[in-house]
Every structure is written in structure tokens, then in C-alpha cells.
Amino acid sequence: MTSARSPGSGETLQERQAALVEALVAGAAIPDGFDARLVEAARRALLRKRAGDVARHWPLLAASFGARWPEVFAEWAAGRPPQGGWQDGLDLARSVPLTGAAAAELASRTPRPRRWWHRRRS
């Protein structure tokens, strides 16, 4: 991997790329030299993509918010690095009060701790 330094910045290309990724997906500050408007547009697009991925894994959770789903998800996900659609959905579901089908979806996907007397004998 190249470690070429950006002219006048003192940072390597790898460091600048990492800083940009952090700004896009984890809420870090936008690095110098990048158009803030374009970075923000890309960040919003990535949040919409993540919301769609979570909705595929957690359809009842997404449906419980109706048309507000993209907004609710974006607000929750802002500043949180992606963990994958299933895990992001689980984390979101555990952080908001749920009722009805969404609560049932969470309950059906959350493993219950086993009691010691239910363990199988070896």
C-alpha cells in the first residue's frame, strides 16, 4: 500500500482516506480540502442505504415507523459506525420503545438465556 504524502498536508493518502471514511460513516469532522456540501450529501446517501439494509433485515421494525423510518434511522445512526444491517437493526430496536409487530419481531430474534436446568447433559 502506498504511503504517498499529500502535497503540503503532511498526511499520507491512507490517513486522508481514513479521515474521510470516519466523516462519512462515524460522524467525524470533515477533513480539510473536501467540499463539506458534497461530503454531507454522500453521508446522507449512505445513511439511506443503511436504512434500506436494516429494513430488509428488520421489516416490521421499519414498518412500525412508516414514512418516518428513514428519518428515525438516520437520527439514530448518525455518528455510529455501521455494524451490518442485522446488528444495526437489533441495536436500534433495543434503544427505542416498541409495540405490536415490531416488539414481537425483536422478541423472536433475541435469544433468551437458558436456565441451568435446561442445559443438555453431555
Image (cartoon, rainbow, N blue to C red):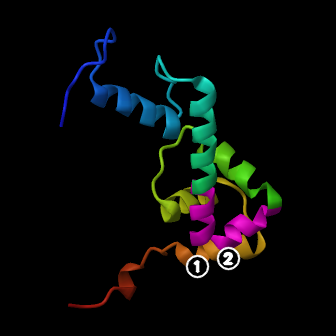
Q: Looking at this view, name the residue that lies furthest to the front.
A: 7
Which numbered disc covers residue 104?
Answer: 2
Q: Is residue 111 above or below residue 89?
A: below
Q: Looking at this view, name the residue that lies furthest to the right.
A: 67
**Mostly what secondary structure, the magenta segment?**
helix
The quadrant holding residue 12 is top left
* Residue neighbourhood size for the residue with mark 2, other residues' Cα within 10 Å, grouped as few (<14), some (14–19), many (≥20): some
Name the kind of residue labelled 2 in the image.
Ala
Residue in the image at 73% along x and 64% along y:
98
Q: In this figure, which residue is indicated by the disc labeled 1?
A: 108
x then y, percent, for residue 33: 47, 18
Asked if disc 2 and disc 1 are in contact, CB closer than 8 Å, the reply is yes
User: Can you say which quadrant of the picture contains the C terminus?
Assistant: bottom left
Magenta stretch: residue 60 in it? yes
Q: Looking at this view, name the residue that lies furthest to the top.
A: 8
Q: Secondary structure at mark 2?
A: helix
x then y, percent, for residue 39: 56, 32
Q: What stretch of residues is rendered in magenta?
A: 50-66
Q: CA distance from mark 2 to mark 1?
A: 6 Å
* Residue neighbourhood size for the residue with mark 1, other residues' Cα within 10 Å, grouped as few (<14), some (14–19), many (≥20): few
Residue in the image at 57% along x and 63% along y:
53
Name the kind of residue labelled 1 in the image.
Ser
The quadrant holding residue 63 is bottom right
